[in-house]
Image (tube, helix red, strand yellow):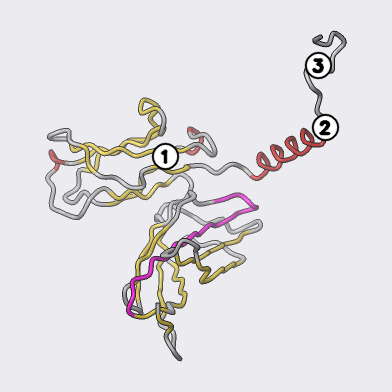
Amino acid sequence: MSLLPEQTPIVTVVFRLPPDFSAPLDGENETVVSVKVVNSKSPINVKDWRHSSVFDVDWKFSFPHRYNDVGVKYQINVQMFHDQRALLVKQDYFVIVNKAPHRQTLHLSPIGFLYVEVQEPRAISAHEAVTITLHDADDNGVEIARASHDEQTATSFYLKYDPERVVPGKRYALSGIENRYHQSVSVTPWQVELAPVSSRLSARLLRSLSQFMQSPLRLFTDVAGKIR
């Protein structure tokens, strides 16, 4: 990779949220964005950004692209917090830049909304529509949400689900079936955590583990009737 002298080209990412999502206005809010280059074995940090607010409309985020004449794969992590509670589904977003300036839209998934990408755009009639199922990654029978995309183009949309029905920290998967011939279709994301583990639960587990590690270990022979 060759470094560019003087002016550094910019990559601009537009983060898009569903129209039904409303950002909380009260309480303690924070948005955190991290950008890394992941072409090599060891990721290279590009930008870490924090802002004391959250967003509910399209918003732009830019970072420098310091390489020329080579394709660069960036990994972007974005999260919004309200009173230390995560508002977005935990996902990795990837942007491949061959030439800058570069602009790309990324669809964020708030808790309760999962952005689904079904297939490449093409005209599709209603009886050839696809049905998308959101289910437990380990048990297809445990269904969380279902949607039949019967518009003229079956491409991408937000699939709503009930956060109360999901287990924090557990992974869920998407499946897609073409309705006419019952053939599987490609759907992303393949697996995802729909609800984060609460910070209070994590702290309680760490506290319990710490107390356990501080307790003296007892061998099974340390009892009244030892094995002889």
Q: Residues within 10 Å of mark 1 (few under 14, many from 20)?
A: some
Instruction: List the residue tagged with mark 3.
Output: 221
130 lies left or right of 208: left
Q: Which-is-in-front pick, marks 1 and 2?
A: 2
Q: Which residues are magenta?
A: 69-86
Instruction: List the residue tagged with mark 2.
Output: 215
Q: Are marks 1 and 2 in contact (CB under 8 Å)?
A: no
In the rendering, which numbered label is found on residue 15? none
In this view, the residue farthest toward the right is 224
Q: Earlier in the sequence, mark 2 or mark 3?
A: 2
Instruction: List the residue tagged with mark 1.
Output: 161
In this view, the residue farthest toward the bottom is 6
Residue at x 66% of width, y 39% of height: 201
Q: Which-is-in-front pick, marks 2 and 3?
A: 3
Report x, y in % for residue 96: 35, 66
Q: Is residue 103 above or below residue 214?
A: below
